[in-house]
Image (cartoon, rainbow, N blue to C red):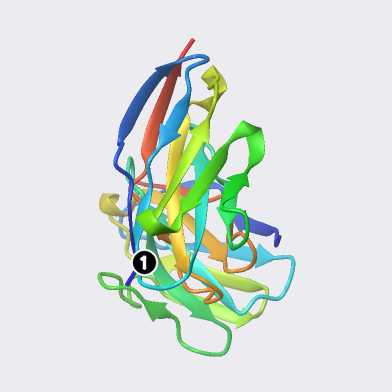
């Protein structure tokens, strides 16, 4: 299975600022997924990121708030923009290879 | 679109008790099924997966799950739980061979008392 390095592992941010989360995969993958896990809840898909094309966002998520980059087949970033306390969550990236590996997550707290 | 239901939101067991967590999915075609575990303060880990073949799947840490196609179910079992099994458990489904997004159930929070 692919191995994903995700960083930062956690951060505390001021409201109104932005945070960029990075995921590096040890092999080339076509699709990468970004999920959000709000406190006490299950995982919700934010968007699917394919290399060389615009990310596809799920209902309720927009590019202005969660811009995604996918410059190559092993790397992607998710930015949480203009943050508010409601954005406090764990953000995870995932790749759709055998077993759907997940990154270790970024625990974001917005104050 | 596929969906997943986990009927038990909270389960409390004593050590050595047997565990069965329910998972039912809704999808008309062939699926791949997964169970993930999230220990307190830790990230998501894959417990086991079903792609095809033997419907009884064995995973890590003594867990197993049985895929019953006629019931659209993929229940997770463990014959004897330990205090260290305290965690949240998520069932997930994806159409087979599609590499589409995983759809997760709402999760079951398991507390094992020593």
**Where's the N terminus of chain B, which quadrant?**
bottom left
* Vertical side of B78 occupied by B68: above or below: below
Residue drawn where x is 28% and y is 55% of the image:
A84
Extreme residue in the front direction: B70
Chain letter of disc 1 in the image: A
Within 10 Å of the Cα at label 1, are there few (<14), some (14-19), or many (20+) other Cα atoms? some
On the question of residue B43 being in view, the answer is: no
Q: Is A95 on the left or on the right of B86, as rendered?
A: right
Q: Residue at x 36, y 54 (%)?
A: B71
Badge 1 is on which residue? A81
Residue at 33% from the left image edge and 40% from the top image edge: A40
Tell which of B13 and B38 is nearer to you.
B13
Pick the residue in front: B81 or B83. B81
- Report if residue B20 is visible in the image: yes
Q: Is residue A1 above or below residue A54?
A: above
Residue A35 lies, in percent from the top left, at 43, 61
Q: Residue at x 48, y 40 (%)?
A: B76
B89, above or below A94, in the image: above
Pinpoint residue B33: horizontal percent, then vertical percent. Answer: 50, 57
């Amino acid at each position: 299975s692919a191995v994903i390095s995700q960083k930062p592992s956690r951060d505390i941010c001021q409201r109104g600022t932005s945070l960029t989360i990075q995921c590096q995969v040890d092999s080339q993958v076509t699709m990468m997924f970004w999920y959000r896990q709000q406190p006490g809840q299950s995982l919700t898909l934010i968007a699917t990121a394919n290399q060389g094309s615009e990310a596809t966002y799920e209902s309720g998520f927009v590019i202005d708030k969660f811009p995604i980059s996918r410059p190559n087949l092993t790397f992607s970033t998710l930015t949480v923009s203009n943050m508010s306390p409601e954005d406090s969550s764990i953000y995870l990236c995932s790749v759709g290879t055998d077993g759907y590996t997940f990154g270790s997550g970024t625990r974001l707290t917005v104050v | 679109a596929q969906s997943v239901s986990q009927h038990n939101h909270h389960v409390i067991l004593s050590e050595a008790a047997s565990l069965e967590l329910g998972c039912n999915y809704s999808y008309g075609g062939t699926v791949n099924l997964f169970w993930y575990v999230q220990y307190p303060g830790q990230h998501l880990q894959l417990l086991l997966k079903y792609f095809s073949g033997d419907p009884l799947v064995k995973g890590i840490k003594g867990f197993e799950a049985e895929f019953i196609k006629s019931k659209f179910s993929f229940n997770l079992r463990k014959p004897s739980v330990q205090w260290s099994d305290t965690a949240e458990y998520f069932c997930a489904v994806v159409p087979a061979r599609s590499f589409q997004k995983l759809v997760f159930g709402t999760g079951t929070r398991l507390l094992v008392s020593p």
